[in-house]
Image (cartoon, coloured by chain):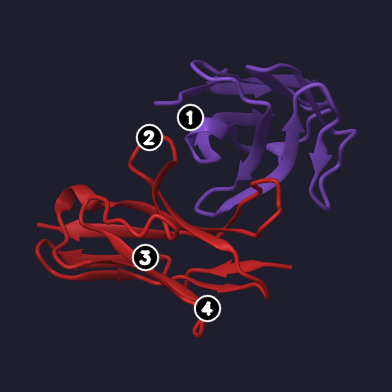
Amino acid sequence: AQRVTQPEKLLSVFKGAPVELKCNYSYSGSPELFWYVQYSRQRLQLLLRHISRESIKGFTADLNKGETSFHLKKPFAQEEDSAMYYCALKPPASGSRLTFGEGTQLTVNP
Amino acid sequence: GAVVSQHPSWVICKSGTSVKIECRSLDFQATTMFWYRQFPKQSLMLMATSNEGSKATYEQGVEKDKFLINHASLTLSTLTVTSAHPEDSSFYICSGLFLAGGHEQYFGPGTRLTVT
């Protein structure tokens, strides 16, 4: 069975500092990986997916199949980035079923 | 963008009663919807996949007789928690699968269930 691990439950950085939210996964095949974000009192929303290879709100994430990781990075954190971030995995032919990591609460301090 | 709503946003019920939660896709048709459960400060756990016009597919360990799912139309799925117990208290979140949007799931705002 697949599994997604986010080792940090809490992450605190200062505004302007680089930030990296770690995500490791276990799956024997080639899954699709996602990052979702949940701002305070808002619903969960997609931030980015690895197949898009795009930067959203300054965030990027690279899929490293060798290390089975999909870390989320931003070079200069902003206060509005404070939120809960979830890494998620979707196996191929899974009917779009997602497996979520436990989430990392990011706080960007002024 | 694709919007999913849930009703009610919060509900309190007594032990032994049943409560129904609605999940609606407002501006798209969702042949597939998903129901998740989220405990405080924990991740989303997929409970079941709801398919329009057919039986839901439940994840391992989820009691289908306790969590009844009905997906009678392309825009509405309902989750009924039957004979609720305090341990069923949780945050229930649904999502609709937007096929035209790259098979992306759009999430509802969630329903807070408290069983007393």
Q: Please name which of the two marks, 1 or 3, marks the residue nearer to the observer.
A: 1
Q: Which mark is residue A10?
A: 3
Residue at the image point whose x is 43% and y is 35% from the top: A43
Q: Amino acid at mark 2?
A: Gln
Q: Are marks 1 and 4 on the same chain?
A: no
Mark 2 surroundings within 10 Å by alpha-carbon count, few (fewer than 14), some (14 through 19), many (20 or more) = few
Residue A101 seen in the current view: no
Q: Which label belongs to residue B109? A: 1
Marks 2, 1 in one chain: no
What distance separates the C-alpha of mark 2 from that of mark 3?
A: 19 Å
Asked whether the beta carbons under mark 2 and mark 1 sit within 8 Å of each other, the answer is yes
Foreground: disc 1 or disc 4: 4
The residue labelled by disc 2 is A42
The alpha-carbon separation of the residues under discs 1 and 3 comes to: 23 Å
Q: Is residue B89 above or below residue A36?
A: above
Judge depth for marks 4 and 3 and give the one in front.
Answer: 4
Q: Which structural element holds mark 4?
A: loop
Neighbour tally class for label 1: few under 14, some 14-19, many 20 plus, Cα within 10 Å: many
The structure residue drawn at horizontal position 59% and vertical position 64%, both measured from the top left corner, is A31
The residue under label 4 is A68
Three-letter amino acid code at disc 4? Thr
Chain A: what color?
red
Q: In front of the other: label 2 or label 3?
A: 2
